[in-house]
Image (cartoon, grey):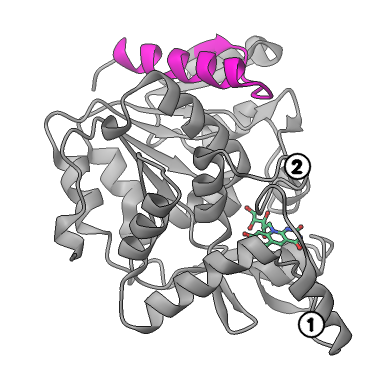
Amino acid sequence: MSTADIDIAGCRYVVLSGGVGGAKLAQGLSLCRPAEELLVVGNIGDDFEHWGLHISPDLDTLMYTLAGVANPELGWGRAAETWHVLEAVSELGGETWFRLGDRDLAVHIERSMRLKTGAPLSLVTVALCRAFGVSLLILPPTDDRVRTIVETPGGPLDFQTYFVRDRCEPVITGLRYEGASEAALLPAVITVLEDPELKAVILCPSNPFLSLDPILATADLRSRLQRCKVPVVAVSPMIGSRAFKGPTTKIMAELGYEASTLSIARYYADILDGYVIDGADHHVSRQIEDLDIRVEVTATLMETLDQKLNLAADVVAFSETMQR
Ligand code: FO1
């Protein structure tokens, strides 16, 4: 199979997603739209090499969530996990700050072996998803290497070192998406974005800086979205000033942004036509509309399958009410 054989026929929605929050919305979308209508483009800025293996945390979170095998307690990795290899590595004095479970490890081994034989990440991802019975298409934005680098007063850190090993403790003075501007957008993504049948681009409730920006920075996808002919709709990752998960609030403050639904709307004002916000943020609707962005107020918490489905259905219905 070559990248030209990736089946994009029938794609109507391009969904940009990071890990946990994005995976939940993607799951909701998969419950209200046929799988062939959805192309999920996942963040690869978090990818790294560990134990000699290529790890793609966000692609895996999407794949595991959609396959129904995600670990709900950890928010990453697989359910019903065991840790025998990690324990054995620890006994050898090896690195254990990044916890790879036994079942999860199988995916990293298989991915790394296929990459080593020269297969591109997109095709490896398609093959892994197929093996897990995931019918909707999950792709990286590019087959080239993109890495999120966190600038700190102590020097640059790769994303997982900052996020997991150092528990997001260093102050962020800047973020870089190494390789993003030189990367080539996947031909399948370009084709779908230019397809006259495309209905909308959806930005999942993911961290704007850590999860969505590495995708948007890839081959300047952001300016492609400014020009694209279909509505671009985002779901806010915040409820009031509370981020769904992770260090969004701390990072936004360190980068000089107020951690709020409104400030994220401002940040994406150049690409957004619509913004889905939680009822807790209804008081900023007017200010968002002043940015020339239409607002849908709904319940954005996604703890149950019903909540995921309802939010996804709202997002789709909202996108159908607008045009560019
Ligand atoms: N996050 C942690 O906080 N600690 C871990 O030990 C850890 C291991 C891990 C293994 C595989 C994987 O796919 C993800 C893993 N994550 C872990 C989560 C992950 O690094 C981040 O949550 C994402 O990169 C942020 O989206």
Instruction: Give the mark toward the camera: 2 or 1.
Output: 1
Nearest to N terminus: mark 2 or mark 1: 1
Instruction: Please tell me in which quadrant of the rendered image residue 34 appears.
Output: top left
- Disc 2 to disc 1, C-alpha distance: 34 Å
User: In this picture, is 74 found above or below 285?
Assistant: below
Kind of residue sitting beneath label 2 = Thr
Does residue 184 appear to the left or right of 242 in the view shown?
left
Q: Amino acid at mark 1?
A: Val
Categorize mark 2 by other alpha carbons within 10 Å: few (<14), some (14-19), many (20+): some
- The residue tagged 2 is 249
Quadrant position of the N terminus in the picture: bottom left
Q: Secondary structure at mark 2?
A: helix
Rendering quadrant holding ligand 1:
bottom right
State the image quarter where residue 9 is shown.
top left
- Viewer-proximal residue, 308 or 217? 308
Coordinates of residue 55 in the picture (x, y in percent): 56, 68
Magenta stretch: give its range: 296-321
Residue situated in front as seen by the camera: 93 or 218 = 93
User: Which residue matches tag 1?
Assistant: 89
Q: Is residue 148 visible?
A: no
Residue 154: which quarter of the image?
Answer: bottom right
